[in-house]
């Protein structure tokens, strides 16, 4: 799909309701991201101009990138990659709910994105909600 086709797809709301994935990017025990993701989802689903779905990276049990060929070729051999790719490719835009670990995103989210060079977020709208627990227990979010 070229850029013109993509723009037309997003502008043609009568034929297509935009599907937006809200992706929880942390897999840690006792994470805050699940609560923040559910909060973002509750806010989003009150809108009637798009469809929203809450996706949790943790539910896919993705190992460290284990495909024998580079993701850029799009020739996946592992069932977990195929499943993850099909789910992610079904959306038109993404909101990542992620903590900040060491001034970056969690390894699980980075790994999940690395699996999907062709099917994933290339040339599609992306946003993020960062959540961070401060030293004294204060939860901060920014979008």
Image (cartoon, rainbow, N blue to C red):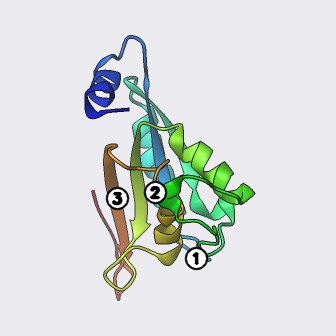
Task: Indicate the secondary structure of the residue bearing disc 2.
Answer: loop
Report whether 40 appears left or right of 28: left
Decide which of tag 2 and tag 1 comes sooner along the chain.
1
Task: Indicate the secondary structure of the residue bearing disc 1.
Answer: loop
Quadrant of the image occupied by residue 8? top left
Name the residue that disc number 2 marks.
Answer: 117
Quadrant of the image occupied by residue 12? top left
Name the residue that disc number 3 marks.
Answer: 129
Q: Nearer the viewer, residue 22 or 4?
A: 4
Percent position of residue 65, x then y: 59, 72
Percent position of residue 110, x then y: 46, 70
**Marks 2 and 3, how far apart at CA:** 22 Å
Quadrant of the image occupied by residue 20? top left
Decide which of tag 1 and tag 3 comes sooner along the chain.
1
Name the residue that disc number 1 marks.
Answer: 28
Decide which of tag 2 and tag 3 comes sooner along the chain.
2
Percent position of residue 67, x then y: 63, 67
């Amino acid at each position: 799909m070229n850029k013109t086709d993509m723009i037309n797809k997003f502008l043609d709301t009568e034929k297509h309701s935009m599907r937006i994935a809200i992706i929880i990017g942390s897999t840690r025990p006792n994470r805050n991201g699940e609560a923040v993701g559910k909060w973002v989802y509750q806010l989003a689903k009150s809108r009637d101009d798009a469809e929203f779905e809450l996706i949790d990276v943790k539910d896919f049990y993705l190992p460290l990138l284990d495909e024998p060929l580079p993701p850029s070729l799009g020739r996946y051999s592992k069932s977990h990659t195929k499943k993850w790719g099909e789910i992610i490719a079904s959306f038109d835009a993404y909101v990542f709910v992620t903590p900040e670990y060491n001034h970056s995103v969690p390894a699980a989210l980075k790994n999940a994105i690395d699996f999907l060079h062709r099917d994933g977020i290339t040339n599609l709208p992306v946003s993020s909600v960062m959540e961070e627990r401060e030293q004294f227990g204060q939860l901060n979010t920014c979008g």
